[in-house]
């Protein structure tokens, strides 16, 4: 769970995080589609970190510094990572508690 959480945090599209680098390869439409994927994953998993990711992605999509022709492979990878890591934060850790 912790590994998924850390990697999900790294997908926030701000500063020098990998999410910012990934968003630079996306078109304006692809950025808004990524926002939609993040919102869907939050609705399905209720992972609180996705709200921060959603805010960062919406800001990056809104500010309008997108390339004209986005990289479709980068979009699928970003969306796939958001989906997989979101579900991984919900994996129950066996044992540990009294």
Image (cartoon, rainbow, N blue to C red):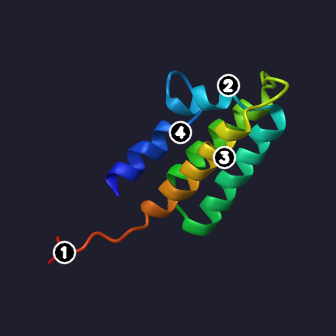
Q: Give percent across and percent down for residue 31.
A: 75, 38
Instruction: Name the residue carrying label 4.
Output: 11
Quadrant holding the C terminus = bottom left
Q: Counting residues from the N terminus, which is met first, the one under dot 1 or under dot 4?
A: 4
How far apart are labels 1 and 3 at the CA level?
Answer: 35 Å
The earlier-in-sequence mark between 4 and 3 is: 4
Q: Name the residue under label 2.
A: 24
In primary-sequence order, the first of circles 2 and 4 is 4
Q: Residue at x 47, y 37 (%)?
A: 10
Q: Name the residue under label 1.
A: 95
Q: Nearer the viewer, mark 4 or mark 3?
A: 3
Q: Where is residue 53 in the image (x, y as percent from the top left)?
A: 58, 43
Note whether 17 is above or below 58 in the view shown: above
Disc marking residue 76: 3
Residue at the far left: name it. 98
- Work out whether residue 47 or residue 86 is closer to the camera in this orientation and state it: 86
Residue 79 lies, in percent from the top left, at 63, 49
Picture residue at 61% right of the left edge, 31% below the top: 22
Q: Distance between the residues labelled 1 and 2?
A: 41 Å
> Which of the pair 53/3 is nearer the observer?
3
| Rendered position, 60 above or below 82 | above
Which numbered marker is on residue 33?
A: none
| Residue closest to the far front | 73
Residue shown at 34% from the left, 71% from the top: 92
């Amino acid at each position: 769970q912790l590994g998924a959480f850390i990697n999900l945090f790294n997908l926030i599209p701000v500063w020098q995080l990998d999410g910012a680098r990934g968003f630079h390869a996306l078109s304006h439409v692809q950025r808004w589609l990524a926002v939609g994927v993040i919102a869907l994953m939050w609705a399905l998993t209720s992972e609180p970190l996705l709200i921060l990711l959603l805010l960062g992605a919406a800001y990056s999509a809104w500010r309008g510094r997108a390339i004209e022709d986005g990289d479709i492979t980068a979009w699928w990878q970003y969306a796939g990572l958001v989906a997989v890591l979101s579900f991984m934060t919900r994996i129950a850790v066996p044992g540990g508690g009294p």
